[in-house]
Amino acid sequence: MKGFKNRLILTSLIVLILGVLSACGGNSASNAGSSGETPAADKEAAASNQDSGNTQPANSTADKKKVVVYTNAGGQGRAEWVQQEAAKKGIDVQFVNAGGGDLANRLIAEKNNPVADVIWGLTSIDYEKFKKQDMLEKYVPAWAEQVDSGLNDSGDYYHATAKQAILMMYDKNVYTKDTAPTDWPDLWNNSQYQGKYAILTSGGATMRSVLAGILMRYQDPNGEYGISKQGWDELTKFYQNGRQLKQGEDLFETLSKKEQPISPVWSSGIADFEQKFNIQMDIVSPKVGVPHLVESVALVKGAKNADAAKQFIDWFGTAEVQGPFAAKFSYFPANKDALKDAPQKVKDIASAVTVQEIDWKFVSDHIDQWVQKIELQIMK
């Protein structure tokens, strides 16, 4: 009996020791991440986040408020910058980037079951369409009064974040002020520029603004889609004598080859191009002026993350965000308190050109018809 008790005590001690060792082993595995080794599951999550463009740690989004933002303004690192800065405020921004026209079409297609919570960028042309289709929710951001009232929607459906001049730029190594074109019609009416200018795809806001700037000179209530026959003849020559970029072809890469040293460009894109390719560009300042676009931000009606969307909008348009954003990406901010941070070159461009008078409501009513005619008849 005594031997049996001794064996029983010994067995119990062995079980106890094994349990302690097992517990220690478990703690070692669970703390592997803090010792520098990431568990396999965490590695997969981190890899997934990296692939999706999220630069935050894999488990950092758990407490963040998710917002889906549709934009045509997120290129050249802008979306990543906004994403990283928003993450510091507890907002998990997921971007969908596309050209202006394509993005607008997608938003309209999804209007009965919206995926987007917020729209950033685009133009008044697009927002007016969205208003007509009851796609936007009224919302007044906390910073609305820091923007000139004429830039914001009077009905409070969208509010301005930046101004963009739509320009013609040229390579200063190829042309001088004396030899460069002075206005868009020079491109197709003067043989020295024929074949020397790039034409962007019609799905983007920049090219649509160029089209508006040209066609509005030939406005005719009795003409096809509100434009006279002379206007359509001139636009046909514009397409016949330029080089049409293919879908997905990079404008700046094309310009760097110097085959087409003249191109349309949005004002904030010039500095990035010059820095990336070490090419000095200059701009044309037509007497009639140049189209100016106002980029805005809006809350989508039926947004699935409406509260977080409002938080994002209230944060995004502040001078504390728009100032550094303008400085980094050569933007001309709509928030007057952020204007001091804009690069001097942006301010110089703003003072060098005048605003072309354009009836944007008229453009909004006809732009889709114009693009359809261009794609089906002029570009065939």
Image: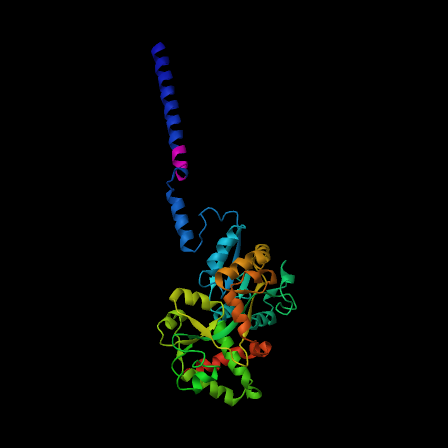
Instruction: Find the magenta span and give its range.
Output: 27-33
Q: Nearer the viewer, residue 94 or 285?
A: 285
- Residue sitting farthest toward the top: 2
Residue 110 position in % (x across, y down): 52, 66
90 or 341: nearer the viewer: 341
In the picture, measured across the screen, residue 94 lies left or right of residue 154, that is: left
Q: Quadrant of the C terminus?
A: bottom left
Q: Residue at x 38, y 42 (%)?
A: 39
Q: Residue at x 50, y 89 (%)?
A: 230
Residue 354 place in picture, x, y as percent:
56, 76
Query: In the image, 25: left or right of 166?
Result: left
Q: Nearer the viewer, residue 314 or 65?
A: 314
Q: Is residue 231 above or below residue 269?
A: below
Q: Does the image show residue 115?
A: no
Q: Specify the principal SS of the magenta part.
A: helix
- In the rendered view, tell whether residue 50 sits above or below residue 197: above
Magenta segment includes 246:
no
x and y percentages locating residue 178 in the rendered image: 44, 81
Is residue 21 visible from the viewing direction of this image?
Answer: yes
Q: Position of residue 133 (x, y in %)?
A: 59, 70
Vertical comparison of 189 with 35: above or below: below
Residue at the image point whose x is 41% and y is 52% from the top: 48
